[in-house]
Image: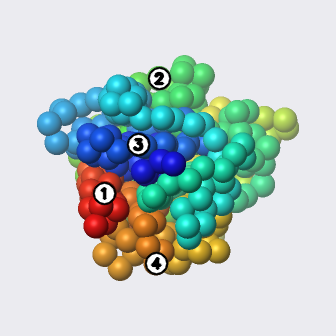
Amino acid sequence: MYDIIIVGAGPAGLTAAIYALRANKKVLIFESKTYGGQIVNASLVENYPGIKSISGFELATNLYNQVKDLGAEFKFETVINITEDKKVTTNKDTYQAKAIILATGAENRKLNINNETEFIGKGISYCATCDGNFYKHKTVAVNGGGNTALEDAIYLSNIADKVYLIHRRDEFRGENTYVEELKKKDNVEFILNSTITSINGNQKLESITVTDNNNNTKNISIDGLFIAIGQTPKNEIFANIINLDNGYIASSDGVHTNVEGIYVAGDTRVKELRQLTTAVSDGAIAATTAIKEMEK
Ligand code: NAP
């Protein structure tokens, strides 16, 4: 019997673990891939209070080690079901807890166009920090207008010879400081009000077709395409007992789900601002709420 099972080892889940472990609770954390969640792919994090600049990978690793040192048990298994009586079933076994915190984050949104899946690893990537180095002195494109796309474009501009930044609007969702930095770079070209309508190549990516808002199309030869168009939640497995809203976990107060003893934290819940800072805040609140209610 665990006190708290946490599903997801991103910043929200790991922060929940810190608070629960420091309150002497027995904690089990499930993660299907690797620890750190989306932040592991961020080339640089520069808006986390108290840390001027750090790579996402380093921050995630520090967080993971902190939780490990506090005595958390990690299982790299995929959760396939949870029940109202707090049983968690994975691809390997079933586990029992007094409380569950859902911190499953979100996964990379796909363009859902031809060749996208086929060419993953053959020119298509969702992680500039992981794959950027394959494109030294080559031509790449980044798609998206959020902080991830802007940071990826900055990162890649220091590796590749040419970077196209393709965004469907002419305003960016991401921070203006990044946009200004990109504007100063000679090897970055903005393609705005445009979407990628086709991914072309034989066995691997060779070019993309871009269509603008006036329906004009053009082909651009590239070696790599970094898709950074946001994330979508992956909560279908909970839908039999947990109320969802557009795929995100619904919560009246940002911490409780509709099932007693099952809490939510981080990007996977309905919320206004999905940031590292708000994810860690959620984790802290979820763990302290779970502990308080468990001890009642
Ligand atoms: P995001 O902020 O949701 O931005 C997604 C971008 O992709 C938007 O510009 C959106 O366009 C575009 N988009 C969405 N669907 C599309 C489609 N089907 N085709 C073309 N474009 C599409 O996602 P994100 O950049 O991954 O960031 C996620 C969260 O993490 C944000 O809160 C971000 O600030 C945060 N983050 C923080 C850091 C950091 O702190 N250093 C780094 C990375 C990310 P529209 O704008 O037109 O909707």
From what the image shows, is residue 224 above or below residue 87?
Answer: above
Secondary structure at badge 4 equals: loop
The amino acid at mark 1 is: Ile
Give the labeled residue for mark 1. Answer: 291
User: Is any atom of residue 219 visible in this view?
Assistant: no
Q: Are marks 3 and 4 in contact (CB under 8 Å)?
A: no
Q: Residue at x 30, y 41 (%)?
A: 24
Secondary structure at badge 3 equals: loop
**Residue found at the very far right of the displayed protein:** 202
Give the labeled residue for mark 2. Answer: 159
Circle 4 residues within 10 Å: few <14, some 14–19, many ≥20: some
- Looking at the rendering, which quadrant does residue 235 occupy? bottom right
Give the labeled residue for mark 3. Answer: 26
Between the C-alphas of marks 2 and 1, the distance is: 47 Å
Secondary structure at badge 1 equals: helix
Give the labeled residue for mark 4. Answer: 258
Q: Earlier in the sequence, mark 3 or mark 1?
A: 3
Between the C-alphas of marks 3 and 2, the distance is: 45 Å
- Looking at the rendering, which quadrant does residue 282 occupy? bottom left
Q: Earlier in the sequence, mark 2 or mark 1?
A: 2
Which marked residue is nearer to the observer: mark 4 or mark 2? Answer: 4
Q: Is mark 1 within 8 Å of ligand 1?
A: no
User: In front: 80, or 146?
Assistant: 80
Q: Residue at x 18, y 33 (%)?
A: 52
